[in-house]
């Protein structure tokens, strides 16, 4: 059971800032994003029952926001999708199938290429890592497949973390940013995962 991140390559797009030396890297990808410092969130759901109703999603995202406020981000709820930085939507299996998501996908984060601006190239142990700012809207889809609230909460926080800049996955079983849903055994970032993003936010904001 997989969680997908968007297949977007922002490397080489309008690099405008100095190279950043990186102390941490906890991702399978060679890029990392950041956004903020003010982030508005809109949530909605097509699911009228179960663990991905609108009210349930609000609770999951509120948990994720608490985690990431320590990065210097300030969150607010948006009453409309228009103008929101992050839209979180619960969808049913039929809708997910119509959108092309296979049965093993429980969540998906879409960061359109037009929402990205390349700002620099980091250096981690002699390897280039590409840094982009998320300047536009991103979209999170959470798919109702009858899972319990603990499972859905972990998936929601995983996807919300992608929407804040965590590109790729951390291939340590049990970690929040693990690539397979059944292998995500926590709703909190490990120290390595948190440092991976925090160094970018500390530098850019």
Image: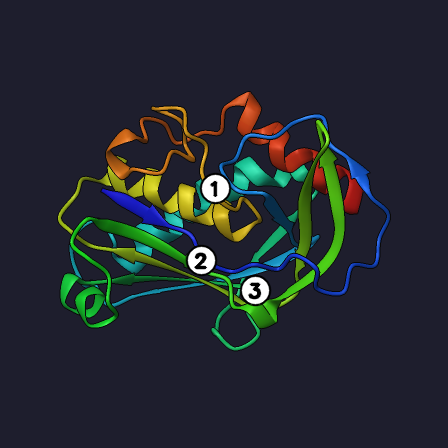
Q: Give the labeled residue for mark 1.
A: 64
Residue 44 picture location, percent across and down: 35, 65
Instruction: Indicate which disc, 3 or 1, sits on the residue closer to the N terminus.
Output: 1
* Whether label 3 touches label 1, CB < 8 Å: no
Q: Residues within 10 Å of mark 3 (few under 14, many from 20)?
A: many
Judged left or right of residue 162, residue 52 is left
- Residue at image position (67%, 38%) is 71
- Of the 4 image quadrants, the one containing the N terminus is top left
Q: Give the labeled residue for mark 3.
A: 85
Q: Residues within 10 Å of mark 2 (few under 14, many from 20)?
A: some
- When asked about the image quadrant of residue 87, the answer is bottom left
Instruction: Indicate which disc, 2 or 3, sits on the residue closer to the N terminus.
Output: 2
Looking at the rendered structure, the secondary structure element under dot 1 is helix
- Residue at image position (42%, 48%) is 159
Residue, far front: 126
- Residue at image position (82%, 43%) is 19
* Whether label 2 touches label 3, CB < 8 Å: no
Q: CA distance from mark 1 to mark 2?
A: 20 Å
Residue 70 visible within the image: no
- When asked about the image quadrant of residue 118, the answer is bottom right
Question: In front: mark 1 or mark 2?
Answer: 2
Residue 126 picture location, percent across and down: 73, 31
- Residue at image position (77%, 51%) is 120
Looking at the rendered structure, the secondary structure element under dot 3 is loop
Q: Give the labeled residue for mark 2.
A: 6
Tag on residue 178? none
Residue 79 picture location, percent across and down: 48, 70
Looking at the rendered structure, the secondary structure element under dot 2 is loop
Q: Nearer the viewer, residue 71 or 180?
A: 180
Q: Residues within 10 Å of mark 1 (few under 14, many from 20)?
A: many
Instruction: Indicate which disc, 1 or 2, sits on the residue closer to the N terminus.
Output: 2
Question: In front: mark 2 or mark 3?
Answer: 2
């Amino acid at each position: 059971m997989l969680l997908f991140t968007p297949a977007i390559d922002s490397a080489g797009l309008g690099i405008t800032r100095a190279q950043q030396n990186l102390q941490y890297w906890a991702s399978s990808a060679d890029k990392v994003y950041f956004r903020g410092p003010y982030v508005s969130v809109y949530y909605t759901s097509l699911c009228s029952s179960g663990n991905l109703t609108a009210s349930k999603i609000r609770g999951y995202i509120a948990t994720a926001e608490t985690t990431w406020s320590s990065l210097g981000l300030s969150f607010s709820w948006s009453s409309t999708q228009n103008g929101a930085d992050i839209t979180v939507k619960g969808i049913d299996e039929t809708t997910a199938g119509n959108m092309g998501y296979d049965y093993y996908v429980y969540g998906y984060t879409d960061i359109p290429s037009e929402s990205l601006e390349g700002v620099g190239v980091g250096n981690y142990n002699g390897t280039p890592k590409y840094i982009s700012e998320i300047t536009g809207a991103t979209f999170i889809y959470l798919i109702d497949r009858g899972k319990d609230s603990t499972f859905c909460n972990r998936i929601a926080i995983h996807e919300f973390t992608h929407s804040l800049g965590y590109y790729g996955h951390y291939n340590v079983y049990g970690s929040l940013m693990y690539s397979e849903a059944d292998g995500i055994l926590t709703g909190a970032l490990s120290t390595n995962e948190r440092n991976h993003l925090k160094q970018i936010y500390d530098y850019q904001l």
